[in-house]
Amino acid sequence: MDPSRGGWMVWTLCASLATQNAALRVSMRESSVEVVRGDSVLLPCSFSTSSSRLSRLNIIWTLARFSSPGSPIQVIVYDHRQVIEDPSFVGRVGFTGLPLSADILLNDSRVSDAGVYRCVVNNLPEAADPGIGELQLSVLEPPSLPDCRWDGDVDVGGSVRLSCSVEEGVPTPDIRWEKVNPEEISLPVNMEGDSTGSVQIVNVSSQTSGLYRCSATNVLGTENCYVSLAVYTAPAGSSGLLQGVLLTLTMSLLLLALLALVLWLRRIGQDGRWRDRKAEEEECYNEIRYTPTLMKRSFV
Ligand SMILES: *[C@@H]1O[C@H](CO)[C@@H](O)[C@H](O)[C@H]1NC(C)=O
Ligand SMILES: *[C@@H]1O[C@H](CO)[C@@H](O)[C@H](O)[C@H]1NC(C)=O
């Protein structure tokens, strides 16, 4: 028997014994991780191995995005001491503890990075039990500025629909509508899908006029947009105004007539004394006649 061949057999035997006794074992230190969009996040994946040889270490991180869970991608791979990244992660992802840990650091996180990550570690011929771990990454995002709109008929008796949609935000922002001016009222919102909330106002009246606010809120913040509604009360309003003006005019005329009557009656009653006072009154007239002259003088 060739001695070198015998040595190889012994090595194989030892390797298979080692495999039976202690296998490579992957453990995830977290089962779910959260990050705010744009921030960095560490995705932990530890493994223990009884082998001192890590030359055939192979690590694969896959991602099943929440948006397409059926088609996972390979985020980053370590194989033959080389690292390969998926194009959508190039420059943003890297191993932090090779070859002793399979942790990766993800920089500049995006909402599309959210999903289920799997860390698969192999170190052939060592058996792996289990050689795989899983964690869920959530990428949170504040709400974007919502878009407020209204449509419908703002004449009295018409109906108006206010709608508000928000494009971004994880978790999905809550949408609320409130009237903020002249008084604060919270309004019932009908959701149309996840990101649009509308309010229907029927039989509008002048009380409908005012400022309305839509707010989109999630754990990271609130953004608002506003709609100002002016209900046109033109036909009813102007005739009311006209009536009011006419009524006031009529009342004033009546009052004037009454006053004239009273004065006339008094004058008749005082007629006897009228002539006696005439002289006195002429003095007054004289005074008035002088006034322009006085004024002229003062201006000179
Ligand atoms: C991620 O950011 C950290 C800290 O800024 C940096 O050390 C690391 O190299 C970055 N990783 C990649 C893949 O750019
Ligand atoms: C509309 O509002 C007016 C005044 O508020 C009320 O008199 C009328 O009955 C309302 N019409 C309907 C259809 O609700």
Image: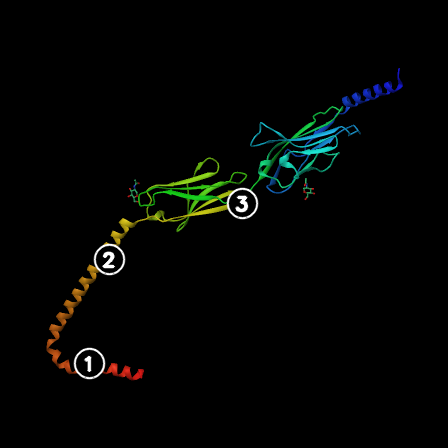
Q: CA distance from mark 2 to mark 1?
A: 38 Å
Residue at 46% in and 43% down: 147
Indicate whether 257 appears above or below 155: below
Residue at 79% in and 21% down: 16
Instruction: Identify the residue under disc 2.
Output: 245
In the image, is 227 to the left or to the right of 44? left
Is the C-beta separation of discs 1 and 3 under 8 Å? no
Instruction: Identify the residue under disc 1.
Output: 285
Q: Position of residue 194 (x, y in %)?
A: 48, 36
- Image quarter for ligand 1 equals top right
Within the image, what quadrant is residue 202 found in?
Answer: top left
Indicate whether 121 appears above or below 287: above
Q: Nearer the viewer, residue 296 or 188?
A: 296
Indicate whether 118 appears above or below 10: below
Q: Secondary structure at mark 1?
A: helix
In the rendered structure, which disc, 3 or 2, sits on the residue that comes first in sequence? 3
Q: CA distance from mark 1 to mark 3?
A: 80 Å
Q: CA distance from mark 3 to mark 2?
A: 52 Å
Q: Position of residue 41 (x, y in %)?
A: 65, 39
In the image, is 153 to the left or to the right of 283? right
Within the image, what quadrant is residue 252 found in?
Answer: bottom left
Residue labelled 3 has its Cβ within 8 Å of some atom of ligand 1: no
In the image, is 51 to the left or to the right of 154? right
Q: Secondary structure at mark 2?
A: helix
In the image, what residue type sits under mark 1?
A: Tyr
Residue labelled 1 has its Cβ within 8 Å of some atom of ligand 2: no
Instruction: Identify the residue under disc 3.
Output: 221
Q: Position of residue 29 (x, y in %)?
A: 68, 34
Q: Nearer the viewer, residue 177 or 12?
A: 12
